[in-house]
Amino acid sequence: MVATPALLELDRVCRRLAGRAVLQDVSFSLHREDVLGLLGVNGAGKSTTLAIIAGVLKPDAGRVRIEGRDMDDDVRALRDRIGWVPERVPLWSELTVSEALEACGRLRGLPKSARKAACERELARLELEAVAHRLCGQVSLGQRRRVGLAQALLHEPDLLVLDEPGNGLDPVQNAQLCDLIGSLSRGRGIILSSHVLAEVAAMCNRVVILHDGRVRHDAKLDASLDDRRGRLEAQFRAIAQPMAAAAA
Amino acid sequence: MSALAVARLDLKRLAVRPFAWTLAGIALAMMAWQFLLGVSTFLHAQPTLPGAATEPGFVDAVVSPYLLNYIQLCLIIAPLITMQALAGERRSQRLALLTASGASGAGIVLGKFAARLVFVWLLLVVVATLPLVLSGATHPDWGQFGAALILSALCVAALTAIGIACSAFTPEPALAATAALLIGEGLSLIDAGVRITGGDGGWLGYLALHTHLAPAMRGLVRSEDIVYFLIVIVLALALAVRRVASERERD
């Protein structure tokens, strides 16, 4: 039997930014229905990793593959299988929420009828109907994140890439996000970054810990939520604290 | 396909932003004033003109200087309307969003150029409407008027393309506007010294905007002038596409 390739595979990815090695030999993989949490302190390389996966940055060395296809072979076609929400959700503040979704659908090349249906589906799924005619520049942070998510989901991507999705959300919004990510993971893979352990423990079934641009830990989270949180915290401290002390 | 989507998106954004309307309002007010001054001067001078066929007519005396004034104004309008096109988008991460949404570098640049071109050409149409209003009372030379209009349209397209190229190379909109303004002014003034001293300007003269606008203002459409503006447009847009397409590899 031939094994199906991983939905996402990073193979010894390296990247320098502003003369600094931000990522060094980063390798991990992700399968459908996986929710992978990318953990790390600020500056660990999480956002750079996600930008590379989204096809926005090119690795200096190493390979990124989507179901066995190399990203560099056809980056535009593979981008169509990815939905990306950066940390600072970039929205067109002059447009209403529904106009912004419509524009994204058009950029994705969705035909008119499919675009309309996709916009309505995402407005309903992300509970944005009430603000559909409000300007993007006037929605709250939580709503802004949901609009970003709706934009990323319009074309039903196989892989969802979320950079710090819980940043700035209140506990209620965080719980809603947790449920949403659970439902979105059916049939697709999700990779999200965070530096909040509880968030990753609640949302993810796998975790990769990045530190100084290297993968320090890569494991499944299969215990109960409390156990997960405890183990994750211990693991994270064991990696981050000695290195911070050594650096000091 | 992506160029069309980007152009529609940017046109929509321009249409709902007060900045574009304010800019258009100020520009049209200034042009209306210029036109009234031109007509007034012409009316005062008309009784002294002998009325021979070689004497300057309405198009020579009013329309051509008026269109040249619009081009002078576009040296400022084009940098202002293009400065956010790519520089502002890059700074707010929306350029990355466009790229991640599947738009190609060429699609992004051409779409943004097309949206701003529609804006400056619409302004040109409104500006050109004022002389048309008087066409019943005067007998304009339509050929000369058309030639001046065609080359003016190409010239403002070239200035817009330069603005887009400058916007592609920096994340700072103010820097992009300054660079576009300097290049535009440079092309406008490059042969001024040579013209003042009575020389033909040589290659410096060829680079100057004035060299390629002056014949059209007299009613002459030369293919070399059209080629000059097309070269500027293609070169500027090619540089911008190259810069945006290499965004993935940059720091």
Image (cartoon, coloured by chain):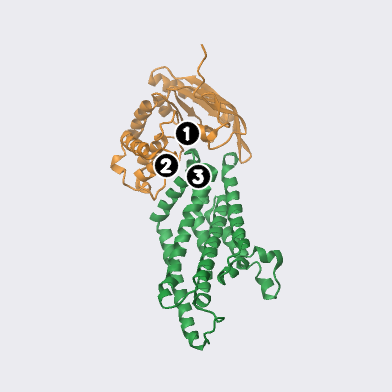
Chain colours: A orange, B green
Q: Give the chain of mark 2.
A: A
Q: Earlier in the sequence, mark 2 or mark 1?
A: 1
Which amino acid lies under the numbered mark 1 shown in the image of this protein? Asp
Residue A116 % position (x, y): 34, 39
Label 1 environment density (alpha carbons within 10 Å; few <14, some 14–19, many ≥20): some
Q: Which residue is mark 1?
A: A80
> In this rendering, do the residues under marks 2 and 1 share a single chain?
yes
Is disc 2 surrounded by few (<14), some (14 to 19) or many (20+) residues within 10 Å? many
Depth check: A42 or B18 in front?
Answer: B18
Most extreme residue toward the front is B53
**Dot 3: element:** helix
Do callouts 3 and 1 point to residues on the same chain? no
Q: Chain of mark 3?
A: B
Q: Position of residue B120 (x, y in %)?
A: 48, 60
Nearer to me, B246 or B136? B136
Residue B243 in view (yes/no) = yes
Q: CA distance from mark 3 to mark 2?
A: 16 Å
Q: Which residue is mark 3?
A: B95
Residue A114 at what x, y percent from top left?
36, 36
Q: Is residue A54 visible?
A: no
Q: Write down the quadrant of residue A223 in the picture.
A: top left
Please tell me which residue is depicted at 34% across the width and 28% down the height of the picture: A179
Q: Which residue position holds label 2? A: A106
